[in-house]
């Protein structure tokens, strides 16, 4: 079964620094990755599956449409960028792995990319906190799937702060 993406290409291009000339094939899988890893983590399995099924069926409406448009899309846009940025300069093809360099530009340092990733993650965490706050007041009455996860299903995470690894 194909994955129903919660955002479109245009959402990422219009709401981030990514250029409209970037080939969709370069970043589409990072949208899917961010959605499955980050967004599913905060929605939980049942709510995630409900929204996915409604998108596939073309029946996303009402409170669920509001949830996607006002909260989930903003989260996903910035998580997708955080996932895409480390790979943006590379292409993997039959001849190997290539790093692109333009005649008119300068390659950025890893620390600069890390700063961009951290900034995108900060944006994503801000929108995730808004989502968590909204759900804490509205989930029981509007989104019953938020509380119906069982057994091996993913239960919604209620903390958006990623403080890094502690060794």
Image (cartoon, rainbow, N blue to C red):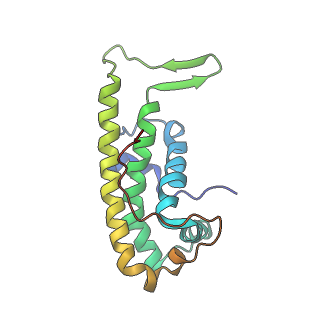
> Is residue 6 visible to us here?
no
Check the image and name the residue furthest to the top: 103
- Whether residue 9 is visible to the viewer of this picture, yes or no, is yes
Relative side of 96 to 124, left or right: right
Residue 47 placed where, x, y %?
54, 71
Residue 80 located left or right of residue 55: left
Quadrant of image for the C terminus = top left
Give the image quarter of residue 106. top left
Q: Position of residue 122 (x, y in %)?
A: 30, 49
Q: Residue at x 50, y 59 (%)?
A: 41
**Is 54 on the left or on the right of 9, as rendered?**
right
Q: Hey, which quadrant is residue 148 in on the image?
A: bottom right
Query: Which residue: 46% across, 49% down?
Result: 9
User: Is residue 136 shown above or below 17?
Assistant: below
Looking at the image, which is closer to me, 162 or 3?
162
Q: Residue at x 49, y 25 (%)?
A: 90
Q: Classify the position of the N terminus by image quarter.
A: bottom right
Q: Is residue 117 above or below residue 112?
A: below
């Amino acid at each position: 079964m194909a994955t129903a993406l919660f955002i479109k290409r245009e959402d990422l291009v219009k709401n981030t620094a990514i250029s409209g000339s970037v080939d969709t094939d370069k970043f589409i899988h990072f949208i899917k990755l961010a959605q499955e890893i980050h967004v599913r983590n905060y929605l939980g399995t049942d709510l995630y599956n409900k929204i996915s099924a409604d998108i596939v069926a073309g029946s996303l409406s009402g409170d669920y449409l509001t949830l996607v448009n006002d909260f989930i899309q903003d989260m996903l846009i910035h998580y997708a960028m955080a996932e895409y940025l480390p790979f943006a300069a590379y292409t993997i093809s039959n001849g190997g792995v290539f790093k692109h360099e333009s005649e008119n530009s300068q390659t950025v340092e890893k620390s600069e990319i890390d700063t961009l990733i951290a900034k995108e993650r900060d944006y994503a965490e801000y929108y995730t906190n808004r989502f968590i706050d909204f759900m804490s007041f509205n989930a029981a009455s509007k989104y019953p799937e938020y509380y119906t996860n069982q057994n091996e299903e993913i239960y919604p995470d209620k903390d958006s702060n990623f403080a890094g690894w502690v060794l």
